[in-house]
Amino acid sequence: MKNFFNPCKTFAAAIIGILLATFFCGCSERSVILAPATGSTTFWEGHLEKDRFPLHFYLQTATDGKQPKMHVTASRPRWAGPVDHLKLSGNQLSFRISTRNVSFSGTIASNTITGAWNEEPYTSWWLTMNSVATPAFMFTRQHPWPPFPYLVEEVSIPGTGNRPNLAGTITRPAGPGSHTAILLLNGQHAQGRDSECYFHRPFLVWADHLTRNGLVVLRGDDRGVGDSEGIFNEATTADFAADASACIDFLKRRAEVTKVGILGHSEGGLVAAMVASECRSVDFLVLLAPPVFPISRVWEQQAPSINRRKGTNERQADLRRKFIAEAWQKLVAISNGNAGKAVFREFYTSFLAGLSEEDRVMIGFPPTKEGQIGIEKDLQEWCSPWMLFMATFDPAASYRGISCPVLGIFAGLDESILPEPNAVELEKHLRSGQCPSFKIHTFPDFDHQMRRPVSHASATYPLAETVATETLSLVTDWLKSQLQAPDSH
């Protein structure tokens, strides 16, 4: 749904992404300073039927009465993060991964967990997870470990109106005094507060780095993920912006906070711009690979790299262009109230019916039961609230409306948000708008994650950097220069 910035392995996935930024809402707050961890962590490994990617789980249980926590990750795209609705009673374990419509219910024995893994409403597998030693790749070399030279708080903010109860973590300098705060907004897909990606946790790295440099940092679980309530798949980017605005209000109310800014990655950068254009209390923005064009243009820019990577021939590329162009026309009509969702289903199924079996296989929907299941999932995503919102949304006004200093960073090897057109467009909007000062930088040899690229299938992947030190240094140096400069906004 929300992962349109990240080209995927099949045509269908490349077009609409796979399910699996946004934070809190504000009313009354509750925060708890964490004590050193008490309890145990166990690791489990299992394989789903016909799936070559292993799933890894780590279950954290506490001896102080706190709720247990469980995370899942894998050497497969977009399977990382905290589970939700976790229940552990005796030897019975159940949980959900709501953003992927997955549920599990099973029994814990001495060295195994066995039970039913359901991907609703289509498929179910019997899954056996075996207890394993801590995998060497589970925590990457940039993963920060306690004891920390700063304080860590769990925060819970009750929802108001249409905003659900959401949860997250604040890290803040241990010493007294006032500090600048920064809100981290993720992109791509539903994630936990650490913005997990395979075995990497970039927002954990960012929070540690920024807090060590004197900032208060707030990061949180997306709605419907981990400890946050709500339904992620029913939200739009406007909902994420409303949540982020509430986070800004939450930070502003803290006694130790003076200024507040936002660091947003990918779609999180767009959300940051939307918030800053409406909220004058945002003091600065750091935008990492933000999408500056409407979604239809973003996909046009991504198409050559997708075709090249898939080995798509010219005829198939033409099919893709035709399909996308007509699909957007239908979504715009639905979004504007000029057509119903049935119109899109009719167009979609008619288009597939006109394809050869070879082309159907190429786009990921062979004429089999599995292909039909994929079609139904695809239709749900195409006509989701998020897609219908993005079909008619132009981010230009949000970028032109920014009235605080901006640091924009792009990556030369980014195939999700192409650096040259987006960097040029961002500069155009900031110059013609209300932005008092800005800096735009492109790292020529970095990828979308702001690091040197490495294949996730490589055995060295977990040893690779999570965020390049050059990216971390550029951001902190710029922030220090802004905080020392006279207030320009």
Image (cartoon, rainbow, N blue to C red):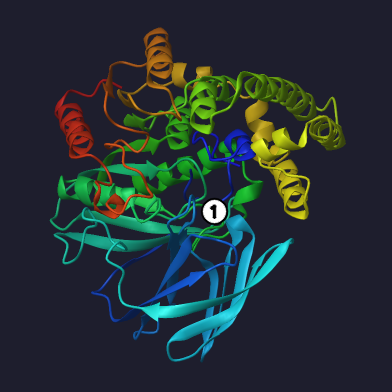
Q: Is residue 157 left or right of residue 200?
A: right
Three-letter amino acid code of the residue under disc 1? Arg
Find numbered disc 1 in the image and state the secondary structure of the residue it sits on. loop
Is the residue 351 above or below the residue 33 in the image?
above
Specify the farthest residue to the front.
Answer: 358
Coordinates of residue 85 in the picture (x, y in percent): 56, 70
In the depicted view, which residue is nearer to us: 408 or 362?
A: 362
Tell me the crowding category of disc 1: few under 14, some 14 to 19, or many 20 or more residues within 10 angstroms, Cα based.
Answer: many
Residue annotated with mark 1: 223
Residue visible at 35% across and 47% down?
Answer: 251
| Residue 167 percent coordinates (x, y) | 45, 59
Q: Quadrant of the N terminus?
A: top right
Q: Please tell me which residue is depicted at 41% across the width and 9% down the height of the picture.
A: 428
* Residue 151 image offset from top left, x and y in percent: 22, 61
Q: Is residue 150 above or below residue 363?
A: below
Q: Residue at x 40, y 17 (%)?
A: 426
The C terminus lies in quadrant: top left
